[in-house]
Image (cartoon, helix red, strand yellow):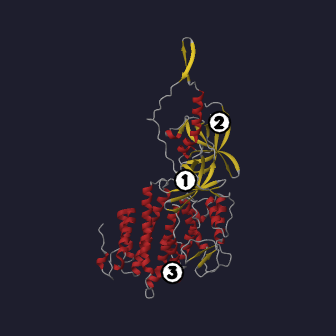
């Protein structure tokens, strides 16, 4: 496609057939791109917007140009939504492709925000056309600011001071011009919204930025916040019963009220919002999907998420009972994170112990008869061949920041540790210990681009390597790393759940089926067990209860 030279049009002159001349031409141009290029029209539009922003004053900034931008934004938003759905639904997308897709979507939103930005500084006394369209443009800008924050939360980063300063200034400008609560139909949707609603959506989602939600859960909370923002409104004075506040003059996220009223503070209460969440939760607990949420039926929407929102958005601070955290200094841990590797590391001390016992009990002295007498001599050591030895895997290390009876907090470098994920299985041990402990990653924060903070719940300090075979036979073909003692590698994990001690097993999620029976071999003993309820689930593993049916002397 040839490059358009906007500078050649001259100041005050527009291209009558270009995408930015008016709303009608914008719609025709975008439809032509979609007919010719399909989904690639998204990238073509971004290139046109980049040229539009680079051209600066070569374009007139009048009501027709603003209308053209809004039409392009409105009609191309489905393409943006499709890319976002693709990003969220692709759990195993390569990192390079994931980064490209994320950058493509962020570029789209940033280009539209830059284009709208120019109309905010125009004197509007004599341009009623711009004044009528500006509430929708500002709502779009606030919507994209919220989406920008989402992409940071997806990767467990937090927006910086500059981001919050810009967001607060945008909302303050909308208030000053009397546009904060002007109703608009954003992206042509049937349900109206306002700049204040979009601002509140961002504020509500920012309260969930503690790092213990998966991207799909964060996205679902964002979509729920869009439906709940109408239950909340911002006020300039705290009556003593309001739940949260934000200072428009300070580049910080919202928090619980703690200081007296100041002119730049805005407050809101969440009583009505929580009441609606409770209503939805009651219906979900009774296995009924609320009518208002049927369009959101996708992974991430469940009663557990609503209970989490109840706590985080509660009208008054929710008090947690948790084990005391104690600071730790100078303690390093080794980490491992794949189930086959964890199984190998867990069984390694036992295998070494058994090999040592076998060597000491064997006859190391060779008997030799000389002239009718029995004597002995030491058997010469066998030469050790290193040609076929497997190279020792280098495991990532971390520094322990704090520890409690149920978990620990650790810090590690970002580079080389892209594997960290909420709900992931994790093995850890200190250099002075031979045995491995098992945990689940519950919280991830990235305070800087170079550092990751992990909150780990301790699942078991003594996992046991096990081998399982289906009770009815028919062992599937599996990769060598997933096989052990003629069966599938698994981990026997006694643990405490909901205040009770249970026998549980970690196995590949593809092998799980409720009630399925397996012969389990662990530390030389054999058992027939049945799989029970799933307690935890990862991308390729699950932790389920097991019921001991009987012990068997030997495998059939």
Q: Residue at x 57, y 13 (%)?
A: 373
Question: In the rendered structure, which disc, 2 or 1, sits on the residue that comes first in sequence?
Answer: 1
Q: Which residue is mark 2?
A: 527
Q: Which residue is mark 1?
A: 398
Determine the secondary structure under disc 3: helix
Determine the secondary structure under disc 2: strand
In the image, is 198 to the left or to the right of 256?
Answer: left
Mark 3 surroundings: few (<14), some (14-19) or many (≥20) residues within 10 A: some
Q: Which residue is mark 3?
A: 173
Quadrant of the rendering where the N terminus is positioned = bottom left
Q: For the residues marked 3 and 1, what is the alpha-carbon distance in whole angstroms?
A: 46 Å
Residue 82, given in percent of the width and then of the height, sits at: 46, 62
Mark 2 surroundings: few (<14), some (14-19) or many (≥20) residues within 10 A: some
- Comparing labels 3 and 1, the label whose residue is closer to the camera: 1
Q: How many dots with numbers?
A: 3
Determine the secondary structure under disc 1: strand
Q: Residue at x 68, y 36 (%)?
A: 550
Q: For the residues marked 2 and 3, what is the alpha-carbon distance in whole angstroms?
A: 70 Å
Question: In the rendered structure, which disc, 2 or 3, sits on the residue that comes first in sequence?
Answer: 3
Decide: is 135 above or below 506. Answer: below
Camera sees residue 194: no
């Amino acid at each position: 496609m040839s490059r358009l030279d906007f500078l050649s049009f001259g100041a005050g002159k527009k291209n009558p057939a270009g995408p930015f001349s008016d709303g009608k031409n914008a719609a025709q141009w975008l439809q032509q791109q979609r007919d010719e290029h399909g989904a690639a029209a998204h990238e073509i539009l971004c290139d046109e917007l980049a040229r539009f922003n680079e051209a600066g004053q070569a374009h007139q900034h009048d009501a027709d140009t603003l209308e053209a931008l809004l039409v392009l934004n409105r009609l191309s938003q489905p393409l943006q939504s499709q890319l976002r759905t693709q990003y969220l639904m692709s759990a195993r997308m390569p990192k390079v492709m994931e980064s490209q897709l994320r950058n493509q979507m962020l570029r789209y939103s940033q280009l539209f925000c830059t284009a709208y930005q120019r109309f905010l500084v125009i004197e509007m006394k004599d341009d009623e056309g711009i004044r009528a369209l500006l509430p929708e443009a500002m709502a779009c800008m606030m919507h994209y600011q919220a989406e920008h924050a989402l992409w940071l939360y997806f990767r467990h980063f937090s927006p910086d001071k500059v981001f919050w300063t810009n967001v607060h200034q945008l909302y303050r400008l909308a208030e000053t011009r009397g546009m904060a609560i002007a109703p608009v139909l954003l992206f042509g949707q049937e349900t109206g919204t306002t700049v204040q609603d979009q601002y509140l959506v961002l504020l509500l989602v920012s309260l969930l930025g503690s790092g213990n939600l998966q991207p799909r859960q964060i996205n679902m909370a964002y979509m729920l916040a869009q439906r709940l923002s109408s239950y909340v409104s911002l006020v300039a004075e705290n009556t003593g019963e309001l739940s949260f506040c934000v200072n428009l003059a300070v580049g910080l996220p919202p928090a619980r009220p703690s200081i007296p009223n100041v002119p730049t503070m805005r407050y809101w209460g969440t009583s009505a919002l929580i009441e609606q969440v409770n209503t939805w939760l009651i219906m979900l607990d009774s296995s009924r999907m609320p009518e208002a949420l049927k369009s959101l039926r996708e992974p991430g929407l469940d009663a557990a998420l609503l209970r989490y929102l109840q706590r985080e958005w509660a009208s008054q601070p929710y008090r947690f009972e948790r084990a005391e955290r104690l600071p730790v200094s100078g303690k390093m841990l080794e980490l491992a994170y794949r189930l086959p590797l964890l199984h190998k590391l867990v069984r390694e001390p036992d295998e070494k112990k058994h090999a040592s016992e076998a060597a000491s009990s064997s006859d190391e002295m060779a008997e030799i008869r000389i002239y009718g007498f029995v004597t002995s001599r030491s058997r010469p050591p066998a030469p050790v061949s290193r040609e076929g030895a497997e190279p020792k895997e280098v495991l990532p290390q971390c520094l322990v920041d704090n520890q409690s009876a149920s978990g620990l907090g650790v810090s590690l470098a970002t580079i080389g540790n892209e594997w960290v994920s909420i709900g992931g299985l994790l093995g850890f041990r200190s250099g002075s210990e031979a045995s491995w402990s098992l945990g689940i990653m519950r919280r991830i924060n990235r305070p800087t681009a170079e550092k990751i903070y992990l909150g780990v719940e301790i699942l078991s300090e003594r996992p046991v390597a096990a081998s399982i075979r289906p009770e009815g036979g028919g062992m599937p073909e599996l990769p060598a790393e997933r096989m052990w003692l003629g069966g599938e590698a698994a981990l026997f994990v006694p643990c405490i759940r909901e205040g009770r001690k249970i026998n549980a097993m970690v196995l590949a999620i593809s092998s799980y089926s409720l009630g399925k029976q397996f012969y389990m071999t662990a530390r030389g003993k054999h058992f027939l067990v049945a799989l029970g309820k799933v307690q935890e689930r990862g991308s390729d593993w699950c932790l389920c209860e097991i019921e001991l049916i009987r012990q068997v002397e030997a495998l059939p």
